[in-house]
Image: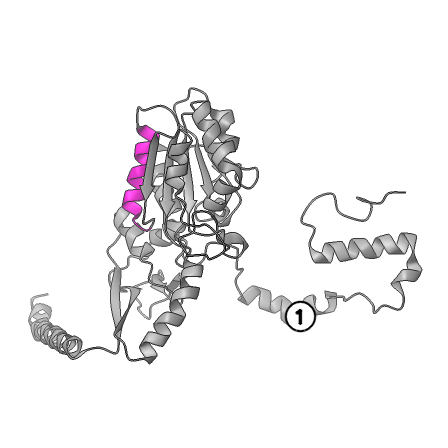
Amino acid sequence: RVHGKDVLPMGGDYTAQVLLGGVREFLEKTEPRLLGNRPPAPDAAPVLNHPAVEKLKQVVPARPPGLCTGCPERPIFAAMKLVEEELGQHHVSADIGCHLFSILPPFNIGATTMGFGLGPASTSAFNVKADKRSIAVMGDGGFWHNGLTSGIGNAVFNKHDGVFVIVDNYYTSATGGQDILSSRAINKRRDTNNSIVKAVKGIGGQWVRQLDRTYDVGKMRDTLKEALTTKEEGPKVIVASSECMLNKQRRVKPQVNKAIKDGQRIVKERFGVDEDVCTGDHACIRLSGCPSLSVKQLDDPLRDDPVAAIDNSCVGCGNCGEVSEAAVLCPSFYRADVIHNPTGWDKFKSKVAMSVIGWLQRRRDRRRPALEAIV
């Protein structure tokens, strides 16, 4: 007798826990003696049903999966939302990878998902005359896995008049940051730095655009809009490149910390929100979805709505400000340069700046009684 779906589920992921349960059930049915004297299976029910745990569920907010803080893929989907506001919705084929988080709020982008590197191939069903072009999103890992031939090559061969966005973050990031053909890092055992753009053009792609900084939301938006509205037929390929922030931080943080310890001058960028300027409509959060961008309540009786706030997990990618500028939102975001081991010139400039700010503040305070008298 062959056992299979009678001890394993028909669908879902075969995790270690699922397989362990399946093997145990299989042995119970066939050879119980092989199980021996085993401890009872752990039962989490008493803990999960404890009143304190139930109360905790009401206090601790849910933490849904999403893109990391500073992820270079976030501005791509922010740009797609801005284009959607102008041109309406298009069919978007998603793919396997970090970028698949686009199907979740706040972006809600992606109608279908087939498999790793199959996003562009799945849009071949939409290679028909239509008012709106289809969009396919694929990562660099999926591109080299099979997307180059099954997706781009197929689109070139069939003259597919669609848009193909290749998210190039230098690694196969979703599985741990492994190097791939187009990784920028020097690898003694692998041949890296192979261009995605050259591969696309080598297989016959004609309309190809390379963006070397995905955080430029305005440029990303304009490139997408051009691809969706150009009269030129055939596949339109956009290669959007910026390094995975998680891998970048793993590499850069130790270097920066060592440099600071050695007394070198290091400038770190931090972003914040001016509480007096923020209107509290939170459009920036809906277009960004950054985990570092949150809200806080002001101790102001005239302000009912909480304002946007940036917490200390910010990595200084600048996406929040880029989104606000591209979407023409309120100018409440500001950038602050934190200087470690400042030079004498840095200290002098800071002293002058603080003196000017103090003088302006005192002048405003002197004028305030006169203004109040007029009112």
Which secondary structure is most common in the magenta stretch? helix
Q: Residue at x 57, y 40 (%)?
A: 115
Q: Nearer the viewer, residue 297 or 119?
A: 119
Instruction: Write down the residue under mark 1.
Output: 51
Q: Which residues are magenta?
A: 215-229
Q: Residue 56 in the image: state x and y as whole percent.
A: 59, 68
Q: Residue at x 40, y 35 (%)?
A: 200
Judge left or right: residue 11 versus residue 318: right
Q: Secondary structure at mark 1?
A: helix
Q: Which quadrant, please, contains the N terminus? A: top right
Q: Which quadrant, please, contains the C terminus? A: bottom left
Judge left or right: residue 21 versus residue 375: right
Q: Report the amino acid beneath label 1.
A: Pro
Q: Residue 212 in the image: state x and y as whole percent.
A: 32, 47
Q: In the rendered picture of this protein, how many numbered marks are placed on residues?
A: 1
Q: Residue at x 40, y 25 (%)?
A: 161
Q: Nearer the viewer, residue 13 or 46?
A: 13
Is 284 in the magenta?
no
Q: Nearer the viewer, residue 84 or 99?
A: 99
Judge left or right: residue 28 versus residue 254: right
Q: Is residue 26 visible?
A: yes
Mark 1 Cα shell of 10 Å, populated few (<14), some (14-19), many (≥20)? few
Q: Residue 14 in the image: state x and y as whole percent.
A: 70, 51
Q: Residue at x 29, y 55 (%)?
A: 321
Q: How is the image coloured?
A: one colour
Q: Is residue 327 visible?
A: no
Based on the displayed image, in which of its 4 quarters is residue 39 positioned? bottom right
Q: Nearer the viewer, residue 342 or 110?
A: 342
Based on the displayed image, in which of its 4 quarters is residue 32 positioned? bottom right
Vertical comparison of 361 with 99: above or below: below
Based on the displayed image, in which of its 4 quarters is residue 23 positioned? bottom right
